[in-house]
Amino acid sequence: LGFLMLSSVGLQARGPGAVILQYHHVATGTPAATSIAPDQFARHLDYIAEQGYQVWPMSRLITALQQDQTLPEDVVVISFDDAYPSIYANAWPLLKARGWPFTVFVATAYISETPGQYLSWSQLREMQLAGATIGNHTHDHSHLLRRLPNETTDAWQRRARDQILQAQALLTRHLGTASRLFAYPYGEYDHHLEQLVAELGFVAFGQQSGAVAPGSDLLALPRFPLSGIYSDLDDLHTKLQTWPLPLAAVAARGADPLLEPQNTRPTLDLVFNNTDLALDQLVCYGPDGPTSMTRISSSHYRAQTKTPLPVGRSRYNCTLPVHQSERYYWYSQLWVLRYPDGSWYAEP
């Protein structure tokens, strides 16, 4: 996200939308790509407080989105994936001292299979009783999009359903109650998986970046990762200052992320509900830099990468300057590409 690096500034007027932050490890000595040092996490919380943001529980934000409520101009939500022990040891004391809510998405198999490397049920209960929300991250954190050899669509759907429902049953059994919040493992989803999640009654979250507002896709809500090289205060400032790209409802869901193996240069159609924007400044970035941008009409633009996407997960990050502001509108589209023979990419 270096193309949007900004210096930290004082409190400013904020626009419509809320930002959901995503963390994993709050520790040193853990994988750098998914870690933030405890002292840096503390600086994040200090900055959020100093700038006057409201930290909401996830449930309050979801209710506002579902009821199409106008959001206050300073809302942030804090979430963690994978329920690592450092959340309890290093993050929670800092959040508890401020009385701030947060959400932890749990893959339930890890609790019994990796003792000491994952939060325990008693730790999760303790945090839940203190106001934390515990969400569903499947049972074994598998890549739900991947089909097993010779697996039919019906068999895949049953397996994915079982992964979600098994986790939900364990969360309910051990915690007494379980939210209907779900985070896709690895942030991977397609429209078929979204439909399954909807049938099960969940609101779901990805790992693509962006802000949220009424009209956002409740089956693939974006979150801003804040780990590794993207954890400094400039990155936090930029992400907190973003607004949702004002797309028409028909375009807000985005394209299906799962690509056919031959579709290595997918197109993304962006249809805007406001043509008074400076759409000539719309830019989308792919893995190799700016995409091509075609103007289809006064409110319709099409982005396409100039070079083939790599196998695995990629994104187009689309931004548009907010008039007379350092802010940017932001939208991120996930892509998941298999090998040319249709096989899945290697485990990360």
Image (cartoon, rainbow, N blue to C red):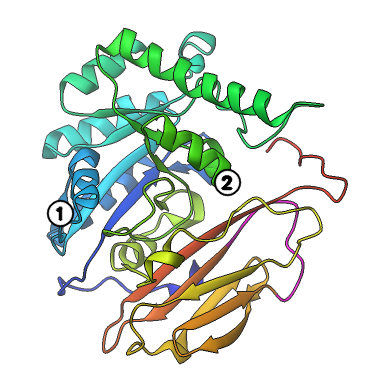
The magenta segment: 306-315
For image coordinates 24% across by 48% down, the residue present is 66
**Percent position of residue 68, x then y:** 20, 56
Query: Is most of the magenta stretch helix, strand or loop?
Result: loop
For residue 7, what is the image quadrant? Answer: bottom left
Q: Secondary structure at mark 2?
A: loop
At a point 44% along the width and 48% down the height, the residue shown is 220
Q: Residues within 10 Å of mark 2 (few under 14, many from 20)?
A: some
Q: Is residue 311 magenta?
A: yes
Mark 1: which amino acid?
Ala
Q: In the picture, which quadrant includes the C terminus?
A: top right
Can residue 27 be seen here? The reply is no
* Residue marked by disc 2: 190
- Residue 172 is situated, as x and y percent measured from the top left of the image, at 32, 13
Quarter-of-image position of residue 291: bottom right
Q: Tell me the tag on residue 49.
A: 1
